[in-house]
Amino acid sequence: MAMAIGNPVHSVWHIAAIGIGLLLSVLATGHVILNKRDSRAAIAWVGFVWLVPLVGAVLYFLFGVNRIRHKAALLRRNIERYRAQAAHPECPPEELHRHLPDHGGHLQMLARVVGRMIERPLLPGNRIDLLVNGDEAYPAMLEAIQHARQTVSFVTYIFDRDEIGMAFAHALGEAVRRGVEVRVLIDATGTRYSWPTILHTLRREGVRHARFLPPLALWHLMSMNMRTHRKILVVDGRVGFTGGMNIRVGHCLQRQPPHPVQDLHFRVKGPVVTQLQEVFTDDWLFTTGEALRGDSWFPKTESAGPVLARGVPDGPDENFEKLLWTLLGALSIARYSVRIMTPYFLPDPAVVSALNLASMRGVQVDIILPARSNLPFILRASRAMWSHVLQHGCRVWLTPPPFDHSKLMLVDGCWVLLGSANWDPRSLRLNFEFNVECYDVELARRLDQLFEAKRKAARPVTMEEVDGRSLAARLCDGAARLLTPYL
């Protein structure tokens, strides 16, 4: 009798489960069709959703939906984006040929592409000075802070509490005591690279500071992967510094630190400094709610040199994949040479194709990577991808220790991309980055000399070397490559 009564109930639950599974499968399939740009990923997810009913749909909604960009857009949707009134007229793409030699005239197409994506003007009248390692960069940055009269804005990923970090904290504190308005923004994850953190020292010095997206705050759990990787220092709105260098003693090679790291940084003067300041003030407003406006933060800048320059912010918000499109644009327009330095080389299929196509068009493509990485797992993943570019004529070079954290791209001896971003998914999809594109033959020549010196000290990677790895090594490298989207 109990069986007779129970069967209808079980049937109802069974039908309900089937109906819910069918509904979720339909909804998941619709979401895949509408949102997945990669057809291979779309086919894989649709197959999984229908081959594993209910479970497949649930797993898709948990792991297959890219919430990073949506979360970033929600977090920053109410920011009042500030654009200072330009004191100098921009250089339109059709006028670029007046600033470049004949062999660089085609780069006006690149200027047009980047301008349409970034929606910031390409500004003339800038000076860009190369600073190699912390031995050159930190003294120049500290000197600028020591001469500050009105404002200092500073954002960085890592700010260690070592002898270099303490020197910066004291210099910033001295600026505050002189009456300078100082604002310091540090990535919340980046504060944890040393213990105790630099935050107590900054408080003691009276420096107004904030952490970007504290990852342990419950309301930020969904955004714990979105870190600011930007490195921007602006003093009095007139002199700026940017590049790839964090604040830590390891970058000072002359001090012979236990873990030396090579890197490049750049001092910037001229109208483009305003664009560095704009990016900082947007991030500061997002983090603290304080709007930094007025002549003390945005003074009228004067022409300082011959370089045409434009800031290229990138992040998982409204600037999503703008740097990726900049790289693809540069690779597609290059005619003679492409020279790349990056510590982490994990390009997606579109970038690999663009590199190979450039090489097959006759462009000399050189990629300099460190022979030893501070993240061995990422080096393994990268090594699994070297053959993808070597087989079509690109050249890969490995520099000897110490680990080289430099980031640089040169195209046709006229175009330079410098800044904080690496050639990996984290920089191109998750992090908030800042780079500067520059059009100038003399700047490109100086950086090309640096590149060539590193290349001569490096050793080339050959297909024979890559193919000659043991089976165990190839399996480990290939397994690491599968995690590329998460590295």
Image: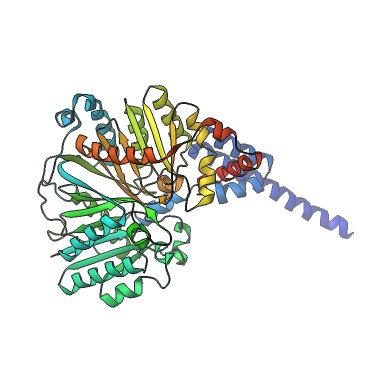
Residue most toward the bottom? 204
Residue most toward the top? 361
Residue 433 rendering spot, x and y as whole percentages:
35, 50
- The residue lying toward the viewer, choosing from 366 and 357, is 366
| Vertical position of residue 198 compared to residue 335: above or below | below
**Colour pattern of the rendering:** rainbow
- The residue lying toward the viewer, choosing from 434 and 119, is 434
Residue 296 rendering spot, x and y as whole percentages:
13, 61
Figure quadrant of residue 362: top left
| Vertical position of residue 179 compared to residue 433: above or below | below
* Res. 289 visible in picture: no
Residue 395 rendering spot, x and y as whole percentages:
43, 32
Q: Left or right of 173: which side holds 404?
A: right
Residue located 43% across and 64% down the image:
193
* Res. 411 visible in picture: yes
Q: Left or right of 19: which side holds 79?
A: left
